[in-house]
Image (spheres, grey):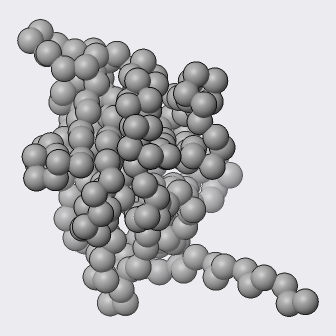
Amino acid sequence: MAEPSRPAPPETFEATLVAARLVTPRVRELLFERVDGQPFLHRAGQWVSLVLPVLDEKGRPLRRAYSLSSVPAAGVRFELVVTRVDDGAGSTFLHEVPVGTRLEVKGPQGTFTRDVEAGPSLFVATGTGVAPFRGMVHEALASGRSEPLWVLFGVRSLDDALFADELEALARQHPQFRFLLTLSRPGPGWVGRSGYVQGHVLSLWQELAAFGTPHVYVCGVKKMLLEVREVLKTQGGAQRAQLHLESYD
């Protein structure tokens, strides 16, 4: 009996930073282009590893992994979003690196992906955890399918809500898509949801279940992931196959 084939190892290549901008006060969006001109093919939800010219305590180049925020396409470019972390050597470098810099890249990698036929889906994110969902949502809406797709996005304040304008525009254009923002530190005059995503996920999950067997995709810090999983398993009856988790800490 033949053994199942192993997936091909991720590719290593060089990419040039061709554009960069701040999308929130602490998040920088980076647009890279492959040096060799080959197409960068990936699935929404995957990530890449960057090799940075910054040495760690053992004298080795830092490697940092980031989810791809770009919508999958057949072009040579891809996008990442990076939060600046206080005293973080990798994020500090990527917030200061000038356009034109070349970096070694390994990827795409990862299995945190969504099949277009997955059915009703709830995407739960905090901070730059919304990055992989940008591509997933665009792919699903472009497919012409009509099942509900809801994004629950938690940030501290409105200034931290990256991609909010884009996702709100999609919600206006597509009745099956909802963008739900919750602020843990809402300012004066805020009339939307407040608090952490953990406090809203159960009611949305139960509402979504009316449309069929739902799936939830969760990306953010590990503490949030574990709490969302516990709530949905113990109170929402979610099965393992319905839970898809990706931690970035």
Q: Along the line of sight, which residue is nearer the eye, 245 or 107?
A: 245
Q: Residue at x 60, y 31 (%)?
A: 237
Q: Residue at x 37, y 89 (%)?
A: 38
Q: Quadrant of the C terminus?
A: top right
Specify the quadrant that holds the N terminus: bottom right
Q: Which x, y percent locates residue 244?
A: 55, 47
Disc count in the image?
A: 0
Residue 237 lies, with reference to residue 123, above or below; the image says above
Judge left or right: residue 17 versus residue 118.
left
Q: Nearer the viewer, residue 51 or 233?
A: 233
Which residue is at 28% across, 24% downward? 182
Q: Position of residue 130 (x, y in %)?
A: 35, 45
**Compared to 107, does 89 lie above or below?**
above
Q: Does residue 30 show up?
A: no
Viewed as shown, does residue 2 lie left or right of 27? right
* Residue at the right extreme of this rendering: 1
At x 84% / y 85%, what residue is drawn? 3
Q: Nearer the viewer, residue 90 or 41?
A: 41
Q: Residue 59: image x %, image y %?
A: 63, 56
Determine the residue located farthest toward the top in the rendered image.
188
**Residue 232 visible at all:** yes
Q: Is residue 64 left or right of residue 23?
A: right
Position in image of residue 212 (x %, y %): 44, 46
Q: Nearer the viewer, residue 17 or 235?
A: 235
Say above or below: 150 vs 78. above
